[in-house]
Image (spheres, rainbow, N blue to C red):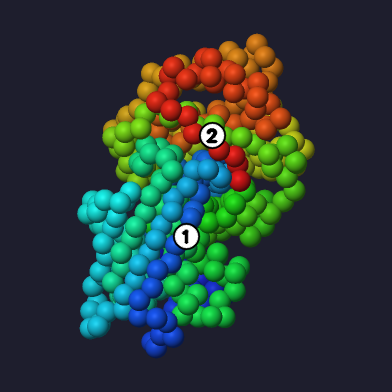
Amino acid sequence: MRINELFFILFVLNLKDFFYRKKKYSIDTNGVVTKKSFSNIALIKYWGKQKNKIQIPLNSSISYSLEDVYTVTRLIYHLKERKKRNFSVRVFFSGKEENRFIPKILEFFHRISFYCSYLRDFHFVIETENTFPHSSGIASSASSMSALALCIMEIERKLVSSLKEDFFLRKASFLARLGSGSACRSIYPGLVVWGIHKSIKGSNNLYAIPYPYQVHPIFTEMVDTILVIDEEPKEISSSKGHQLMNNNPYAKERFKCAHKNMERLISILKVGDLQDFGELIEHEALSLHAMIMTSHPYFLWMKPNTLNVLYKVWDFRKQSRKNIYFTLDAGANVHLLYPIQEKKFIMKLIDNDLLSYCKKIIESFCK
């Protein structure tokens, strides 16, 4: 993978500056950088990775970044007195030291050290916290890895004062992808695309890009109310779930369907058809969970109250003709998407009919 990816970067994308090779640092030996990064909710789902490659998707995806669902990360760095080749990391989550996160961070550092050679020269302390439950299917790895990637790029900006903002974000997305695939989409606000699609100019597998085409105003003011059905960490991680797509008998058809759905969404976003939008994102959500249920081994992320909410939403929409639609990520929790103009009416539904199925709700906006 590394040789192929290196060729793609150097000769196709002409991004050889992704490789930092400078030996002398014009940087304080100690310092702190802080970054905030938002979770995202995919409309067209990424599910499945190319074999023998690191975080390369088998279909393109598009997501909204979520304004009030985010991770804040402080990266404290100290230049080592003696240069050692091993990484030096401590991790604190919500004020408590958490060694369980260290293996994933070390794997991430190992993957990106090819592009950020300076990482081995510092001791790092990572202090991070979320505004939402961790590992419960609200894309905590996306916001946390993207926040960390932004912190690392802020250090690189101190090393290279001439770093331009577009390159800063592009490389941050590239690095974030190597920690968590969907994290590359959390670097940008709004609608963000990751993965090659012939109809989306600039789309590629190595980093995300802001959605480049016209978007109807109705889709720039969407609310996302997250119904937290289950706050506990998922029994099976998303990473393991992705691996199960390799032998899923329905995987090829799923990838074809995702490609067609992306094509269809381009038109929907342009003309502002809320009903088609809702039908599409609900189909995508249920397709994702169909892949989970037909993997081997098979499993369920939905809980009984997940289904209760879905049926309530369908019934409410049929009776009220309001534009309220759901999507699901890799977990039990439900995202309700609707235009801000209908928020007052829909909040009554949530308060009266849906709260009893939830641990809590998180109200956000599609940023």
Near-viewer residue (268 or 24): 24
In the displayed structure image, the side of residue 236 where residue 345 appears, left or right: right
In the displayed structure image, the side of residue 32 where residue 85 appears, left or right: left
Q: Identify which residue is drawn at 33% across, 61% down.
A: 126
Q: Reply above or below: 169 against 255.
A: below
Near-viewer residue (325 or 346): 346
CA neighbours of label 1 inside 10 A, class few (<14), some (14 to 19), many (20+) = some
Q: Identify which residue is drawn at 31% across, 33% down.
A: 232
Q: Reply above or below: 103 against 307.
A: below
Label 1 secondary element: strand
Q: Quadrant of residue 364?
A: top right
Q: Identify which residue is drawn at 35% across, 76% down.
A: 30
Label 2 secondary element: strand
Which quarter of the image is occupied by the N terminus? Answer: bottom left
Q: Amino acid at mark 1?
A: Lys
Give the CA separation, mark 2 to mark 1.
22 Å
Residue 91: where, in percent of width, then height?
A: 28, 58
Residue 78: where, in percent of width, then height?
A: 31, 75
Give the residue pinned by disc 1: 35
Give the residue pinned by disc 2: 363
Residue 208: where, in percent of width, then height?
A: 55, 56
Q: Amino acid at mark 2?
A: Glu
Q: Of label 2 and label 1, which has the lower sequence position?
A: 1
Near-viewer residue (111 or 82): 82
